[in-house]
Amino acid sequence: MLIDGRNFWKLHSRWLLATAVATLVAIAWNSIAAMRSGRWPGGGSLTGLVFGLLAAAIFLFELALVAKKTKAFRTARWLLSAQTWMKAHIWLGLLTVPLVVLHSGGRLGGALTTLFVVVFAVVIASGIWGLVLQNVLPRLLLEAAPAETVYSQIDRVGRQYAEEARRLVLLACGGQDEWPGHPPQAVEAAAVAAGGGHIHGARRQTGLQVQRSPHPASDLPPSIPSPAIQNALARDVAPFLETGASDRGMLGPRERNTWYFDDLRLRVAPELRTLVGQLEELCERRRQLNLQRRIHVWLHNWLWLHLPLSLALVVLLVVHVVFALRFG
């Protein structure tokens, strides 16, 4: 859920005001109770019990978001939209902070209560951290990786980039016999795709053979063998495009890629420098896919801390209630 200056008030004004009013009402009621009793109310007082029950109910609602995101309830209209659930999740989660503080009377108590408060603090902090990441990283991804694709298709797209690099080198430098899976017919098909040629007819297999359309390969400039480019493709470029990693550490960050291809341009014929630029562009796209993968990890891995601790918090809540009822 993106939060910025343009949509914050529109999306969250009611929730913000409701949370603020509820917090002020709770503080006012607790203050009045403190003045009447002459001491700050604890968890066993009327206000403490009410605040504790409200916080416990919110904890259970917050955990229900997990069920809402499952396939069974994701599209259920009677459960309201996912955006509404997320708003409630954010603001009700923040509301539990003053409720828990007022319920405890500002005291930690024993070991169980202290553990509960520590876990609660980490859950709130991790939730705020996740909210920040959800609002910052997508914007960063749009600016830094315009070549992003569907996350699950990153490796497949990388393999396509590698095939495109091999095709470009094959057309410009020749040597199709050295490339498995690229027979001469594939070269002709690639030439058509690259040069925009169209086949208007087919060669006759019997009788007088007449070439009814230009041969695709005949329209291409003569190939220029380049061991430097072919070695670079085999050793560095193709593996990097396929896997996103460079075993020799020659490719990866943008600056390293620039150095690599600047050096390669100096070692090839001038006619092949356009090809080097095309290979560099493919590697730049693969670098952006790597960046997308790293951002995706940061965007979702905080849940590995937030969700288990949220479950642990509910367990500690149950234990806290049982101990409070049994031992007062």
Image (cartoon, grey):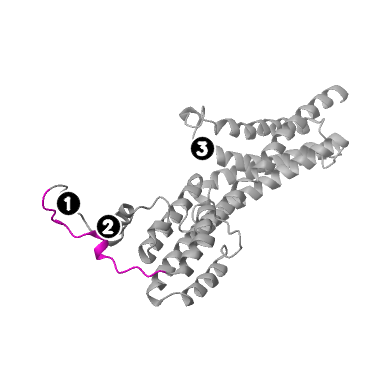
Which type of secondary structure does the marked residue at label 1 adopt? loop
The one of 17 and 180 positioned closer to us in this rendering: 180
Q: Out of 311 and 97, give the one closest to the viewer.
A: 311
Kindly identify which residue carries mark 2: 192
Kindly identify the amino acid type of the residue bearing the numbered disc 2: Val
**Which residue range is magenta in the image?**
207-225
Does residue 214 belong to the magenta stretch? yes
Image: 192 above or below 267:
above
Q: Kindly identify which numbered label has been placed on residue 82.
A: 3
Tell me the SS state at disc 2: helix
Q: What is the three-letter code of the residue carrying label 3?
A: Ala
Picture coordinates of residue 151, whole percent (x, y): 51, 47
- Give neighbour class at mark 1: few <14, some 14-19, many 20+ (Cα, 10 Å): few
Q: Do the residues bearing badges 2 and 3 touch, measured as CB atoms within 8 Å?
A: no
Query: Could you give the CA–CA distance between mark 2 and mark 3, rounded to whole angstroms?
Result: 48 Å
Q: Position of residue 2 (x, y in %)?
A: 53, 50
Residues at discs 3 and 1 in contact (Cβ within 8 Å): no
Q: Residue at x 13, y 55 (%)?
A: 210
Q: Is residue 230 visible?
A: yes
Nearer to me, 77 or 55: 77
